[in-house]
Image: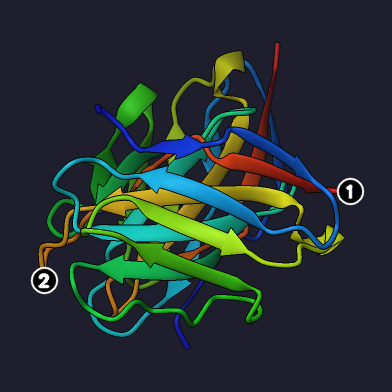
Amino acid sequence: GAGVSQSPSNKVTEKGKDVELRCDPISGHTALYWYRQSLGQGLEFLIYFQGNSAPDKSGLPSDRFSAERTGGSVSTLTIQRTQQEDSAVYLCASSTYLGGVSDEQFFGPGTRLTVL
Amino acid sequence: AQSVAQPEDQVNVAEGNPLTVKCTYSVSGNPYLFWYVQYPNRGLQFLLKYITGDNLVKGSYGFEAEFNKSQTSFHLKKPSALVSDSALYFCAVRDSNYQLIWGAGTKLIIKP
C-alpha cells in the first residue's frame, strides 16, 4: 500500500483480556517503530525493529507487552491481561534505514485501545 | 542526556498573524531535527527536517524552521497562520541509535 496501515482502528476490551494490534509498514521500509500516545500527550516509545537485528525493547512498560515482526514486514503488538492504564492510541511508524543518513518516519493512523 | 524541549504547551495566534512554535534540543554530535504535525483524530505527518546546510528549512503547508546551533533551537514558523493550521506539533531529534527523541508537543490554536 501507499502508507502505513494499522488494524483495528478501534479496539474496546475488558480488563484482563489480551489484545493484538497489527501494523503493516510501507513496502521496503526496514525499520518499524511502535509508540503509545495518551490523550493529547506526547509519544512514548515502545519498541523498534530494524531488519533482522534484535529489536530494541527498552520502551516496553511491562512484561505484559510484547511485539514481533514476521518476515521483516508486518508487526504485531500484543498486550496481555490488559489494564485500564493501557488505554491509549498505539501508533506504528516505518522508515528506511540509511545508516548515517537521516530517515523520516511515516506513521499509521493508529489503533485507539480502550480498556473497560 | 539527549532531550527535546517544547516549552509551550499551547500557542494561540490570530489568523493571518505570524506564528512560532518553539523547540530546543540537547544531543551529542550533529543534530538531525524534525517537525511533525498531528491534526485532530489523524496520524502524525512529517512537516520538515534539518540535516545539514542552510539553517532555514522549508517544509509542507508553508511552514519553515530555523536551525540555530548556538542556541540549540529549531523553532517552527509560518508567516501567516491559517485556522486549518490548528493542530498538535511535535519536535524530534534523532539520537545516536537512529531513534527519534520526541518533545511533549505544542497545541497550536489559530483563532479566526
Disc 2 crowd rating (10 Å Cα; few below 14, some 14-19, many 20+) is few
Residue wearing tag 1: A116
Q: Secondary structure at mark 1?
A: loop
Q: Residue at x 21, y 58 (%)?
A: A71
Give how far apart the Cα atoms at labels 2 and 1 are. 44 Å
In the image, which disc is placed on residue B107?
none
Asked whether residue B11 is in view, the answer is yes
- Percent position of residue A89, x then y: 64, 46
Q: Nearer the viewer, residue B89 or B38?
A: B38
Q: Nearer the viewer, mark 2 or mark 1?
A: 1
On the rendered image, what quadrant is the N terminus of chain A found in?
A: top left
Residue type, mark 2 in image: Gly
Which chain is indicated by disc 2?
A
Q: Residue at x 76, y 53 (%)?
A: A87
Q: Is residue B52 left or right of residue B48?
A: left
Q: Is residue A84 left or right of residue A73?
A: right
Q: Is residue A33 left or right of residue B16?
A: left
Farthest residue, direction bottom: B1
Q: Residue at x 46, y 66 (%)?
A: A67
Residue wearing tag 2: A100
- Percent position of residue A69, x then y: 33, 62
Residue type, mark 1 in image: Leu
- Percent position of residue B99, x then y: 35, 69
